Amino acid sequence: MRARLIALLLTPMMLFAADLQAAEDTRARDAATQLKDQVIEWRRDIHQHPELGNRETRTAALVAKQLRALGLEVETGVAKTGVIGLLRGATPGPRIAIRADMDALPVAEEVDLPFASKVRVQFNGSEVGVMHACGHDAHTAMTLGVATALAGLRDQLSGEVVFIFQPAEEGPPTGEEGGADLMLKEGLFERLKPDAVFGMHVFYTLHAGQIGVREGPMLAGSDRFQIKVLGKQTHGAQPWRGIDPIVTAAQIINQAQTIVSRQTNISELPVVLSFGMVHGGLRWNIIPDQVSLEGTIRSFDPLMRQQTFDSLQRTAEHVAAAQGARVETVIPMTEAVNKVTRNDPALTRRMRASLEHAVGADQVLTIPPSMVAEDFSEFADQVPGMYFFVGSVPPEQELASAEPNHSPRFFLDEAALEVGMRAMLQVALDALAGAAQPKR
């Protein structure tokens, strides 16, 4: 039965027997317009009260309360703070999933908004600000809007919708499990395996009103690495009596930049190697024993990924040896991997018609692969998936001047909320529009 439903979902005639009626179907547009103010209100409330990964208790309570009010079957405490809502249509049909992430980032907000975050928490031993600097507040609010609209249309629907409100997309706290991986590990897709999964993300490379999507690789795979450079401590006035791990670390960082620029065929697919953390030393006049480096590798191809690992290992070892130092490496840190997010080509090709119907064909852009990473990839690795970007930049602003996601100055044009809600709602309606099948 599952195979028949998957074939049904991916068959052009199904996908869009509904396409013949698309010109007359205004349900998504009408519902998005009616729910716009409510979605903005939800988004502002969540934005003002951000929570870090595995700590999204207030957000999860808000989501669960709304889903229960809509009459959905609700699970809470999934992967610590996740919420699952199941909407059953009036007649049998495909089962689809829609995923929204709920967590914020340890970033102090610098945007002057009446609902700006003032939240501060302890994170990695320091007091930090907390901000929805990546737009997960928008994803949660838009998906609540989609759930509200579909619940109001349940008598017209065939099939089921699984709403996945996921914690810890940005990664769980050190020493904890979380995110999509933990949801699947706890058996989410064993209990409620969908025939397709959909996700969206507000993004700073598009104007509000635009949608970005592509078939195949959409977001890079992400790996984290650690290199400890081990030297010999000595007085800063007598460097010859020790082995300087700071100078060695600097040379490793510099030499590693040639791995992508000189050793990788990036005409095929891009690769990024970046260092993000350098820790070493306790006093200005002491050369320390060691320096710790951490960073990220982003890639799309398994062979290129492995080549980058090997090159970084070789570079670190040889540069250190030349200085009389040595290294201890963890390349990659396997607990920190995000897979490549790949949009199923057949599904995406057909569902693009839904996006175009929702916002206009000229507003749906084919975008290049992005080097950011997402654990939506875990879901899309299990079943056919489609992930798309929703533009967040005000139309009058130059894209080049827009602050990126993860910036303390990231700004969302709230017109994007209606656009994203309308697009996902149209995707859901069309994906559910197949011939009836017996209920499971």
Image (cartoon, grey):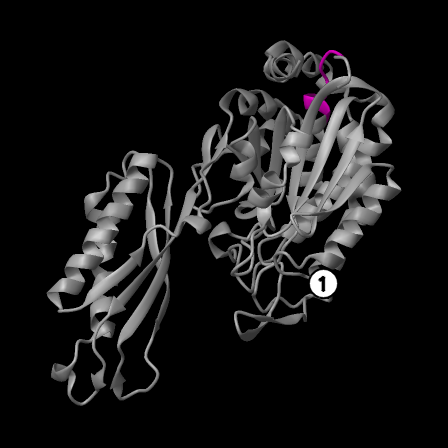
Question: What is the span of residues highlighted in magenta in the rendered image?
Answer: 429-436
Q: Position of residue 329 (x, y in %)?
A: 29, 58
Q: Vertically, is 348 above or below 11? A: below
Instruction: Residue under label 1, please give it.
Output: 49
Left or right: residue 30 versus residue 408 is right
Which of the 4 quarters of the picture holds residue 109? bottom right
Horizontal and vertical percent for residue 164? Answer: 68, 40
Vertical position of residue 88 compared to residue 406: above or below: above
For the N terminus, which image quadrant?
top right
Q: Please report the residue visible at 53 percent of the width from the left and 33 percent of the height from the top.
A: 213
Quarter of the image for residue 315 reads bottom left
Residue lying at 62% horizontally and 45% vertically, measured from the top left: 208
Q: Is-magenta flag for residue 433?
A: yes
Whether residue 404 appears in magenta in the rendering, the answer is no
Left or right relative to 299: residue 263: left
Compared with 207, 330 (above or below) is: below
Q: Residue at x 79, y 40 (%)?
A: 74
State the image coordinates of residue 80 (x, y, percent, origin top left): 67, 52
Q: Is residue 391 visible?
A: no
**What secondary structure characterizes most of the magenta part?**
loop
Residue 113 or residue 251, whichever sits in front: 251
Q: Nearer the viewer, residue 172 or 354?
A: 172
On the image, which quarter does residue 13 sit in? Answer: top right
Quadrant into which the C terminus falls: top right
Task: Please indicate whether residue 295 sits to the left or right of residue 209 in the image.
Answer: left
Crowding at dot 1, Cα within 10 Å, few <14 / some 14-19 / many 20+, comes out as many
Asked if one can make out residue 27 in the rendered structure from this viewpoint, the answer is yes
Q: Amino acid at mark 1?
A: His
